[in-house]
Amino acid sequence: MPISVNIWQGISRLSLQEYRSKRNLERSGEPKGSKPPSEGGKIYVIQRHQATHLHYDLRLEMDGVLKSWALPKGPPTQPNLKRLAVQTEDHPIEYADFEGVIPEGEYGAGKVEVWDRGTFEPIEVDKNKIIFRIHGEKLKGDYCLIKLRPGTDPKNWLFFEKKTTR
């Protein structure tokens, strides 16, 4: 059952204006954000980002942009492994294919490479939870992003593989 685009409105919208304001796109070589949303499936990508500290970035296509979360300890690669996911600014759709080195002195300086890619299907979405099925090259199955409890940083979520009954 397809989920209406309106359901994404509960997820905080961080604009591409914020993305652009943090970067010198001419110098960094990062995408400017002019590509329309994808056809034939929602984009899912995890990028390995060797910046000041190695981390990974989870990106899910929602509402015409890539909603983004930094994964300080990497993606959950086994069941029952919960990872902190810190929501960051929205990225343009074409960032899903971006690989390269962001120059020193630029926001996010360091090497970016695609670690996993594919599509995803939203299963359940509200302002505090996203349950989705990943069809990636490395990650496959049902995963959850759950916002941490009230009183914590509102950008902090947990990312983990959903337990399945067998």
Image (cartoon, rainbow, N blue to C red):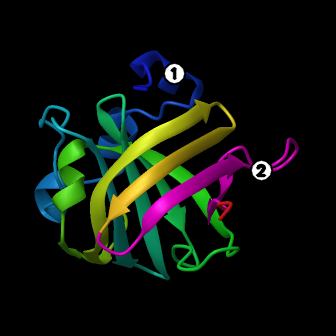
Q: Which secondary structure, mark 1?
A: helix
Q: Which residue corresponds to the image point at 40% horizontal and 78% vertical from the top-left? A: 51
Q: Residues within 10 Å of mark 2 (few under 14, many from 20)?
A: some
Q: Earlier in the sequence, mark 2 or mark 1?
A: 1
Q: Is residue 67 magenta?
A: no
Q: Which residue corresponds to the image point at 88% horizontal and 44% vertical from the top-left? A: 151
Task: Say above or below: 34 vs 108.
Answer: above
Task: Say above or below: 32 vs 6.
Answer: below
Q: Quadrant of residue 117?
A: bottom left
Query: Which x, y percent locates residue 80?
Result: 70, 73
Q: Quadrant of residue 24?
A: bottom left
The C terminus lies in quadrant: bottom right
Specify the label residue 7 is tagged with. Answer: 1
Q: Is residue 105 left or right of residue 121?
A: left
Query: Which x, y percent locates residue 68?
Result: 44, 51
Task: Name the residue beneath numbered marker 2.
Answer: 148
Q: Which residues are magenta?
A: 137-163
Give the alpha-carbon distance from disc 2 to disc 1, as whole Å.
20 Å
Query: Which x, y percent locates residue 6?
Result: 46, 16
Q: Is residue 21 left or right of residue 103?
A: right
Q: What amino acid type should be assigned to the residue bearing mark 1? A: Ile
